Amino acid sequence: MSAVKHYLDLRGEVCPFTFVKTKLKLEEIGAGEILEVILDHEPAVEDVPRSVKSEGHEVLRVEMIGEKLWRVVIKKCLE
């Protein structure tokens, strides 16, 4: 797996802003690059991966990293 080059800390954000901000960040990075998103809004842990997959990106990992804290690792699709 490629190294994570981009990070987005969305603690304190709620849906739909978690997906909107993730989508905007994905637009800034290059195809094939990896984005790590930190979330603390539980519904976003399902919504963000589902939404980025529907946009054609690959979700590499979703993991709990603390109490009410998750990491979602996304690989941007080819443009």
Image (cartoon, rainbow, N blue to C red):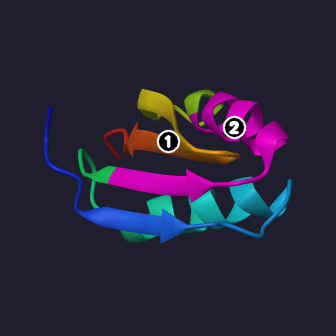
The image's mark for residue 35 is none
Pointer 2: residues within 10 angstroms few (<14), some, or many (20+)?
many
Q: Quadrant of residue 18?
A: bottom right
| Left or right for 52, reference 73 | right
The residue beneath circle 2 is 45
Q: How many marks?
A: 2
Nearest the viewer among 15 and 42 is 42
Q: Is residue 6 above or below residue 79?
A: below
Query: Counting residues from the N terminus, which is met first, the one under dot 2 or under dot 1?
Result: 2
Nearest the viewer among 11 and 27 is 11
Q: Quadrant of residue 17?
A: bottom right
| Magenta segment includes 10 | no
Residue under the image location 25 percent in, 51 percent down: 33
Labels 2 and 1 touching (C-beta < 8 A): yes
Spot occupied by residue 27 in the image (x, y as percentages of width and height): 47, 64
| Left or right for 59, reference 31 | right
| Left or right for 75, reference 2 | right
Q: Which residue, as the protein is rendered here, is positioned at the far front?
A: 67
For numbered disc 2, what is the local secondary structure?
helix
Residue under the image location 85 percent in, 60 percent down: 14
Spot occupied by residue 38 in the image (x, y as percentages of width and height): 54, 56
Provide the residue span drawn in magenta: 35-52
Q: Is residue 2 above or below residue 29?
A: above
Q: CA distance from mark 2 to mark 1?
A: 8 Å
The residue beneath circle 1 is 72
Pointer 1: residues within 10 angstroms few (<14), some, or many (20+)?
many
Q: Amino acid at mark 2?
A: Val
Spot occupied by residue 52 in the image (x, y as percentages of width and height): 59, 38
Q: Main secondary structure of the magenta part?
A: helix
Quick one: quadrant of the N terminus?
top left
| Magenta segment includes 46 | yes
Q: Is residue 71 above or below residue 23?
A: above
